[in-house]
Amino acid sequence: MSDHQILAVNVVYEIRAGPSRDTAIDKRPVTGAVVVGELGLDGDTQCDTRNHGGPDKALYAYASEDAAWWAEALDREINPGLFGENLTTCGIDVNGAVIGERWCIGNGDDAVVVEVRMPRTPCNNLSARVGIHRFHHRFGATGRVGAYLKVISPGKVSAGDVLRVEHRPDHGVTIADVLLNRTPDTAHRLLEPPADIADDVRRLAKRIIDRAKRRSPSAPHVCRTSRREPVTDLQALGEAQVLQLAHVEFERRSLTIDHRGQVACPPCRVVGDQVQRRSRPRSV
């Protein structure tokens, strides 16, 4: 018996009224084999098709080990499907799965092949489902978010099916990395050829690289408010010995040079090349 299995297959039980829109997050286990098509499980649905569903989000997998972690953290039972997952897995580190990794579920002609595409970006429907205010922020911050899967080969899936990892890309970027380790190195590895990644992940990787270039000490500072380049770059200003209240005016925005010779852009809240605000993870 394989250590990697499907513990439960979950489809929508009822459509609920969410905080801002109807939601199909209420998913519960079903028995028997369920047909898996290009867009997911037979009998399942999504209400917010802008943010859910589609080929790159056909299935949502969550590990029973992570559910057990939450059960202990919240001191409550976490049943399969509570977080809205289609597949509750056992024995595989879903958050440690590499983007582009392929799994084969089941055996024979009905076996299903899926590909790991991206992490889940939790929304306030999850908080409403669990009954904890702003829980989706806490959920995302742990990195225990599960993975969206693309269906490569349709078939049937049922509880107890064996799950085998058939392919793992060399770039090594995992579901958790995309959510919590958003560095230029991570982004460059994702974009290395052949780079068959989801459009949302590709856009995220490019944003990470572009942001790093803008924050480079050797690059001109671009004010995020005016979106225009000032006449002088950060490095040149930072080396100058200027009085504390000296300013460089540009488009009614000022770069302030403090007593340490560091440059500050009030609209962007940048000091030197460091952003002085806590940035939130972007949706993928």
Image: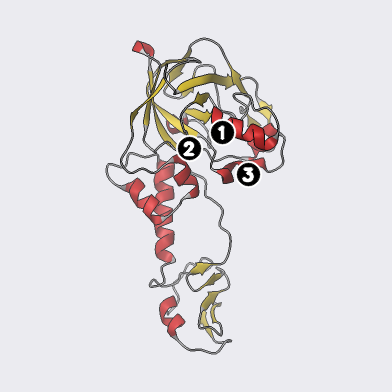
**Residue 66: image tag:** 1
Q: Earlier in the sequence, mark 3 or mark 2?
A: 2
In this figure, which residue is indicated by the disc labeled 3? 138
Q: Nearer the viewer, mark 3 or mark 1?
A: 1
Cα distance between the residues tagged 2 and 1: 9 Å
Task: Assign a secondary structure to mark 2.
Answer: loop
Q: At x 55% / y 30%, what residue is drawn?
A: 65
Cα distance between the residues tagged 3 and 2: 16 Å
Most foreground residue, 131 or 5: 5
How many residues crowd around disc 3 within 10 Å: few (fewer than 14), some, or many (20 or more)?
A: few
Image spot of residue 184 (x, y percent): 39, 56
Q: At x 56% / y 33%, what residue is drawn?
A: 66
Where is residue 11, by image quadrant? Answer: top right
How many residues crowd around disc 1 within 10 Å: few (fewer than 14), some, or many (20 or more)?
A: some
Image spot of residue 45 (x, y percent): 55, 23
Most foreground residue, 215 or 18: 215
Q: Image height check: is 205 above or below 123? A: below
What amino acid is found at the position of numbered circle 2 in the picture?
Answer: Asn
Is residue 75 rendered to the left or right of residue 4? right
How many residues crowd around disc 2 within 10 Å: few (fewer than 14), some, or many (20 or more)?
A: many
Q: Image height check: is 262 above or below 85? A: below
**Residue 95: image tag:** 2
Q: Image height check: is 77 above or below 263? A: above
Task: Assign a secondary structure to mark 1.
Answer: helix
Q: Image height check: is 218 above or below 60? A: below
Find the residue positioned furthest to the top. 32
Most foreground residue, 161 or 45: 161
Most foreground residue, 172 or 252: 172
What amino acid is found at the position of numbered circle 3 in the picture?
Answer: Arg
Whether the residues at callouts 2 and 1 have beta carbons within 8 Å, the answer is: yes
Q: Which of marks 3 and 1 is nearer the N terminus?
A: 1
